[in-house]
Amino acid sequence: MYVDKVRRWPEVVGAKPRLGILQVHMRMSGEPGSGAGKGGGGGGSIREAGGSFGKMEAAREDQYFYNQQKEQLKNLRDGLHDEISFHEEQIKRHQEAIERHKARIGKMEK
């Protein structure tokens, strides 16, 4: 078990850079779905047309990014829980080693 956790160490501490970065989504236009943005690029033919389809597409896009951010937070939280349990296990092993060494020292002094 200990060897498996050590092998997984880069995974446990979050070596996956996408876990630590939360995406932020910003719009360039006034109202979501109201047409092409001010950034120079269009949002696609449906978004450029505006109206209810544009608003619906903007709502879907917002939902997508909300779900993506929610998943990233869940992965980050899970990774931190794994890291905490790994460190707790190491603390336990170190305390056991300290007790063994103290017992050996006690035997030597007799």
Image: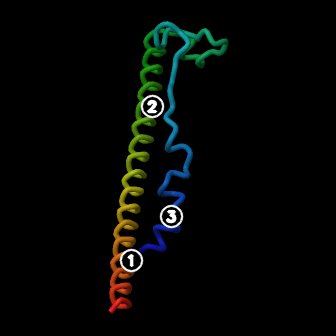
Q: From this view, report whether residue 39 is shown above or below residue 5.
A: above
Image position, residue 80 (x, y; %) = 40, 51
Q: From this view, report whether residue 11 is shown above or below residue 54.
A: below
Residue under pointer 1: 97
Give the number of the disc on residue 72.
none
**Residue type of the residue flagged with mark 3:** Arg
* Residue mark closest to the camera, 3 vs 1: 1
Disc 2 on helix, strand or loop? helix
Image position, residue 109 (x, y; %) = 36, 89
**Residue type of the residue flagged with mark 1:** Ala
Q: Residue at x 60, y 19 (%)?
A: 44
Image position, residue 48 (x, y; %) = 57, 12
Disc 1 on helix, strand or loop? helix
Q: Residue at x 43, y 12 (%)?
A: 52
Q: Quadrant of the C terminus?
A: bottom left
**Sequence order check, earlier mark of 1 and 2:** 2
Q: CA distance from mark 2 to mark 3?
A: 30 Å
**Most foreground residue, 96 or 20:** 96
**Sequence order check, earlier mark of 2 and 3:** 3
Q: How many marks?
A: 3
Q: CA distance from mark 3 to mark 1?
A: 23 Å
Q: Residue at x 41, y 35 (%)?
A: 67
Residue under pointer 2: 64
Residue under pointer 3: 8
Quarter-of-image position of residue 39: top right
**Sequence order check, earlier mark of 3 and 1:** 3
* Residue mark closest to the camera, 1 vs 2: 1
User: Dot 2 surroundings within 10 Å: few (below 14), some, or many (20 or more)?
Assistant: few
Specify whether 41 is left or right of 106: right
- Say whether marks 3 and 1 touch (CB < 8 Å): no
**Residue type of the residue flagged with mark 2:** Tyr
- Say whether marks 2 and 3 touch (CB < 8 Å): no
